[in-house]
Image: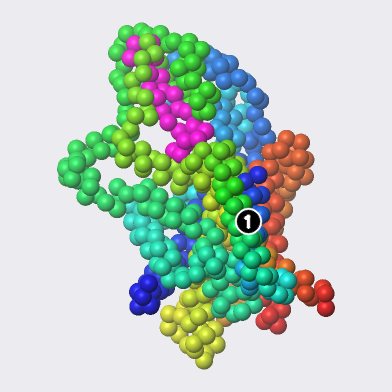
Amino acid sequence: MSAGLRQSMAWLHTWAGVLPGWVLYFVFLTGTLGYFSVEIDRWMQPELPLRSRDVPVQQLLEQGLQRLQQRAPDAERWTIELPRRKSPLPPRLVWRGAPAADGSREAGSEPLPPGTDTPRLRATGGGQVLYQLHYRLHYLDTQLAYWLIGACAMVMLVSILTGIVIHKKIFTDFFTFRPGAGQRSWRDLHTVLGTVALPFHLLITWSGLVLLASTYQPLVVDEVYRFDEAVQDAFFIDNAPRLADQPRSGVVGALLPVTYWLAADGGDAQGARLVSFSVRNPGDANARVVLVRERRNGHNGTDQRVYGAADGRLLDPGLQRAPARQVRDALVGLHKGGFAAPLLRGLYGVSGVVGTLMVAAGMVYWAAKRRARRATPVGDGGGGLAWVERANPAMLLGPLLGVCVYLLANRLLPLELPSRGAWEVHALFTTWGVALVGSLALRPQRAWLRLWQALAVVAALVPLVNGLTSDRHLGITVPWALQQGDWVLAGIDVSLLGVALVAGLVARHLSRRTA
Amino acid sequence: MSSLLAVLLGLVALALARPAHQRLLLRRALPPRHGRLLWIAGAVTLGLALWLAVRDDGWVLGLLRWCGAVSAAALPIVFGLPYLARGLYSSRR
């Protein structure tokens, strides 16, 4: 390969990586947390029971249908939500479109089996908000955020490919890390982290682009569905068939027994698992049954089948999709990792952390390399380099600090506060903003030190405040985990203590170096 | 877990196959023949790990798990090697 080409690629890699680097770092960080969104959801609602009672699916469905018949006989839709592999949430009954006394239609839900104590759950953004931050950002129009994230993802893909080209000894240097060697250490760190999880970086970036392809490539939809907005609705209907949404016929119809649906589902035999049982237009001849199954070895989480409720006829087999759609679904499934068992999800998490650190190391290396060529001290001299050096501490540690404050806000904000979940997110971004102001005001070495110290304190505060404000603290969750093997709640507190420990060690190291 | 362990062993062998790491840990380079043997042992063990993962989970999930295992197992080796070497020689002094 010619040196000229490699040099050009190196230039592209450097500038393509630096410009959206902070956004990519935030996307990697929140996307990695998204792999544990259900666990974070559970931590952020400490009112949930530690575990719901184990009741066979057939019994749950029979009890649920009986209860729905009593509670909302004329509803437009009944749904019985069953536990998922990843989700700890107890089974639930949900109804929509039930006639209310004032003539309107109402929705409602209650836990299953009937009679279970209903915990009053606090309002929270939970892990879902953290997950959504990685593709929707916040305080921005959704379409604008999609475009912004798409552009950054494209740049990331370019950076990965050019990184492969410029790295002459990618496999020989696989294990090369030289600590304490200044900017060379940062380069080693960036390269090693990029190489050890290279397949993950490629997969996650490429599939992320595919995920929102219809946003970035609207002309494809225009070509097939024309430019008329009303006709373009057909695109979305084609992508989400609505065979289940049929009008009522007005003729009374029966629902086949639960045993029939369990046999039709055939779930466990195929390694899949029934996670939702819905009846649309219950009691009507035009009723539909929708079975949603979580696949064991599938790559797009769930699939859905629609049946006639009275005759059991399969109306939409769900799986028969066009090949292009199947490829897209597989890529999207691989991106989200929703199908992954705990070990594989843990590996997704490790790879996500590696990606986050790779981007961070790249940002620090960019500044360190340029500073080494100048005579002025770090943070001085004005221009882009000084700005990057001064902003880096807040842009890299600020989001982490913000997430810890987000968790603290979950425990400290008044339970009755209106829009409580939104205030949790405001707490995250306010913290980040304060960190940025402080970082720009201080010299970079001092800013790094103060932010690492702040992270150590705030991360350690989360389990402490959790212990003072809820009964899901380590004193309860660790014995529970040792007894039941359920480490979700204890794992989050222990991870935060780990973050506090690492941050404290780094702060001590920096403090000694600057003293 | 067996495939994760095999990946770890394979990567250790591959790391030790490099003269730079041999000098770092042993303060001398091994004969080239030993280096080649370590390289082959590492590659075969990584292949075995891939076979174990694919056998358990099929091609798609097995390959995915193997790639994840390589990432996870490489981290302690990459970041442990220099500090392990420092620890070894500072305690001998």
Quadrant placement of the N terminus of chain A: bottom left
Determine whether the residue tagged by mark 1 lies in a helix, strand or loop. helix
Q: Residue at x 37, y 24 (%)?
A: A317
- Confirm whether the magenta stretch covers residue B43: no
In this image, A145 relative to B49: left or right? left
Specify whether residue A148 is in view. Answer: no
Magenta residue span: A283-310
Q: Residue furthest bottom?
A: A375
Residue on which disc 1 sits: B41
Q: Residue at x 38, y 10 (%)?
A: A310
In this image, A113 relative to A265: left or right? right
In this image, B36 relative to A190: left or right? right
- A444 vs A293, nearest the viewer: A293
Residue A16 figure quarter = bottom left
Specify whether residue A311 is in view. Answer: yes
- A257 vs B65, nearest the viewer: B65
Percent position of residue A279, x then y: 42, 20
Percent position of residue B45, x then y: 62, 51
Q: Residue at x 64, y 61 (%)?
A: B38
Q: Residue at x 63, y 35 (%)?
A: A48
- Amino acid type, label 1: Ala
**Residue A430 sits above or below residue B25 on the image:** above
Percent position of residue A196, x then y: 54, 60
Chain to which the residue tagged by mark 1 belongs: B
Residue A174 figure quarter = bottom right
**Residue A269 sits above or below residue A204 on the image:** above
